[in-house]
Amino acid sequence: MNGRYILALDQGTSSSRALIVDAAGAVVAARAHEFRQIYPQPGWVSHDPNDIWDSQLRAAHEAIATAGIPVADIAAIGIANQRETTVVWQRSDGLPIADAVVWQCRRTAPVCDQLRREGFEPLFRERTGLVLDAYFSGTKLAWLLDNVPGARGRAASGELAFGTVDSWLVHRLTGGRVHATDRTNASRTLLFNLERDAWDADLCDILNIPMTLLPSVQPSGSLFGETTPELFGRAIPIMGIAGDQQAALYGQACHSDGTMKNTYGTGCFALRHTGSNLCRTDSGLLTTAAASVSPSPAFALEGSIFVAGAAVQWLRDELGIIKTAAESEPLAASVPDTGGVQFVPAFVGLGAPHWDPYARGTILGLTRGSTAAHIARATLEAIAFQTREVVDLFDDSAGMPGTDLRVDGGAADNNLLMQIQADLLGRPVVRPAVSETTALGAAYLAGLTVGLWSNEDEVASLWKLDRRFEPQISADERAERYGIWRRAVERALRWVEPGHNAVST
């Protein structure tokens, strides 16, 4: 191994970040660049793949310059990426054939409905651990092949390549030499057979996707190739890749069965590690690959909540009752409870465990005395209740309670939200001192693989506590409040009739 630092690329939905992480697990430098969000029509979300690449490369160069280290001191690159976002490019010159279809995009909801009517959902569920939902990459890829002129014929002749954002970055970083992904990203495509640890020919046939499009699949901690020397002045090995939520699980030192984390961002993404156990469930949770440096697969259960921090943004941008997201905390704290108000923020439908693209946002329990403060507090409670739904199912599906909940993401800085979360879960909520867990996970995977750290125990020792939140309400109160929330959710489900503005935002 040469070098004492890892360059972690954290490619997200709205910005591309780059961090320099040292051998003590400290973030030496960080830079980020936002890029354009494209909304072709209601419910559709796209990115220009070249915007993703340009913003990520700029952030990387600036992070290295800010750290003031020679490139020779960078031992490896690790990548964490927005998952499910779908890119197709020409093998001959690397040019994308269209804008990327983003994970948030609902354009293929009718396709998923049709596949369910044809009886395919049990097969996809059994083999991939996923539900049939527009969230995942497979139907997005099929849509691109069907809607970009000439794409299907060119795909059949081997002229095109598909990848999630990690594969797109590896393609660009290696000068087009490598077409690869890791297990965690492959497991989010609706095309990857978890039990066989391979792409599934039957599922590809159902979606009419030529397997020649697909990247090779590797363990999250492995050599994915080297950067072209002209990018950074020398070739740097790419030694770790994980989808952002699996990277955050790894960055939170959740390496073993029963450990779990929740990331509070635009949405919430809770994952519970299940070790080598491929835990299947019909509860509405997803079974997914977990990041590992081992050649053998590791697995996790996941609850994907579509709207969390986005609900606070709605208070700010659409309702105008706060000027900044941070103001939600003192406003909500100005009242002792929600005054009976319940808010189900199903702006784009509901994810786990309901998977209802036709649910819509609902506010119930309003009286003449309801205030902006009550709505703000109900918004924070909604985030915590959605997480409670998922964590309860983790325990039921795994057959045993998990550990305390480790938290990260922007909304984890909200102390009131974290206390509400501990109260409604009935278990401790633990916040780390370093919140950059997604990038740290990518750095740890790359650093372990390249030899900067010796084992996962050493990596786990780098995790440091910021604050621990203990439950402060009784079990009876917790159960009563949760029961009211579940009644509110029932009223939000199936609000829009399929085919009638079903994917509008």
Image: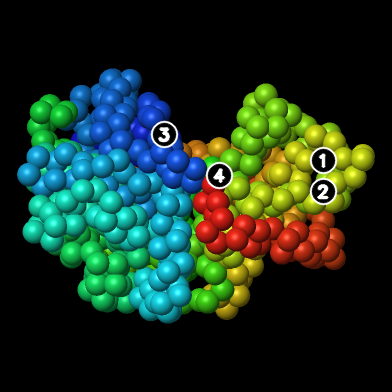
Q: Nearer the viewer, mark 2 or mark 4?
A: 4
Q: Residue at x 41, y 34 (%)?
A: 37
The picture places residue 371, in percent across and down from the top left corner, at: 85, 36
Q: Residue at the front extreme?
A: 500
Q: Nearer the viewer, residue 38 or 500?
A: 500
Residue 37 numbered mark, or none: 3
Q: Earlier in the sequence, mark 4 or mark 3?
A: 3
Dot 1 and dot 2 residues touching (CB under 8 Å): yes
Q: Secondary structure at mark 3?
A: loop
Q: Nearer the viewer, mark 2 or mark 3?
A: 3
Residue 374 numbered mark, or none: 1
Circle 2 Cα neighbour tier, 10 Å, few/some/many (<14 / 14–19 / ≥20): many
Three-letter code for the amino acid on which mark 3 is drawn: Gln
Q: Residue at x 23, y 64 (%)?
A: 209
Dot 2 and dot 3 residues touching (CB under 8 Å): no
Q: Secondary structure at mark 2?
A: loop
Q: Earlier in the sequence, mark 1 or mark 2?
A: 2
